[in-house]
Image: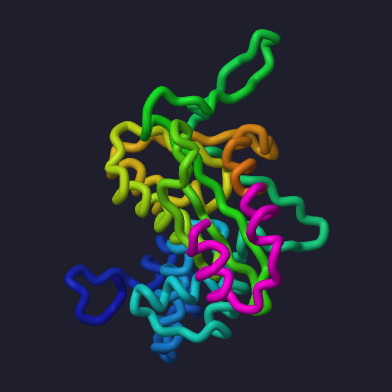
Amino acid sequence: MAATGAPIRVPVAVACRVLGLSTQGYYKWLKAPICQRDWDDAHLINAALDIHGDDPGYGYRFIADELAELGIIASENRVWRLCSTQQIFSLHSKKRGLNRKPGPPVHEDLLKVTDQHGRPTHDFTATGPNQKWLTDITEHPTGQGKLYLCAVKDCYSNRIVGYSIDSRMKSSLAVAAIGNAIALRTPTATILHSDRGSQFRSKKVVRLLRNNGLRGSMGRVGACGDNAAMESFFSLLQKNILDTHRWQTREELNRTGLGGDS
């Protein structure tokens, strides 16, 4: 407003008063305006905030990966510095004296019913395929670090109708598994039930369900029985296959333990 050549020029004192700035600060900035590095950092922070808002489970490493996918080149150290400055931390980060709670559900609990004693329970039965799906994420250690599996189970056949495997537990893991099930089954008005994990609450998953006509459903906080049928499958998978062998690499576990006949 006060710049030379402005269409309607306003006195510096008036412009600063309207914007809540000091005239001293304005003239200081005028002598040394913002450098390109600070300008680039501001844009990177905005992108990081958008990514973290989409999936609060993302820490700076995941954010750096997502920035790279968007074509924004920045080292992990730089992303860490900017995220620390802006207090952008993973929902799962562990801090002393800090007790984080799962975020609010983005879907109602569509499988919840009441038993004859008035207690809440869940109906995991279905009269046909693609009526009710369950999904969850499990992990298993290898010599190279953990490997994560997201699977989608059909309540009617008790078969896994879609899955994905990754070395990081990002929202893209859930998106890939659900997308795999959709591509194989082409469901209509299917209920997809999950827990309140940040991966399933992410905008990417919500958008995927909406665009494909699926209905999301979420259980309560800390109630494993709300997704008991899926927990049971993962328990058998861990006991009968994954725990029977010590896996040296993620590729070995992926190929033999998860990606094979299991």
Residue at horizontal 68 percent and vertical 63 percent from the top: 93
Image quarter of residue 248: bottom right
In the rendered structure, does residue 239 fall within the stretch colored magenta?
A: yes
Q: What stretch is highlighted in magenta?
A: 236-262
Q: Which of 88 and 102 is in front in this view?
A: 102
Image height check: is 220 above or below 245? above
Colour logic: rainbow
Residue at horizontal 38 percent and vertical 30 percent from the top: 131
Whole-percent x, y for residue 133 in the image: 45, 37
Image height check: is 236 above or below 216? below
Residue found farthest to the left: 7
Residue found farthest to the top: 116
Judged by its main secondary structure, the magenta piece is: helix
Instruction: Kindly tell me whether residue 108 is visible in this rendering.
Output: yes
Report whether 254 appears left or right of 84.
left
Residue found farthest to the right: 97
Image quarter of residue 1: bottom left
Report whether 20 appears left or right of 117.
left
Tally of numbered tags: 0
Whole-percent x, y for residue 259 in the image: 48, 64
Instruction: Kindly tell me whether residue 54 is visible in this rendering.
Output: no
Image height check: is 202 above or below 40? above
Residue at horizontal 24 percent and vertical 71 percent from the top: 9
Residue at horizontal 37 percent and vertical 32 percent from the top: 129
Q: Which of 48 and 23 is in front in this view?
A: 48
Q: Nearer the viewer, residue 154 or 96?
A: 154
In the rendered structure, does residue 149 fall within the stretch colored magenta?
A: no
Whole-percent x, y for residue 27 in the image: 44, 83
Whole-percent x, y for residue 11 in the image: 33, 71
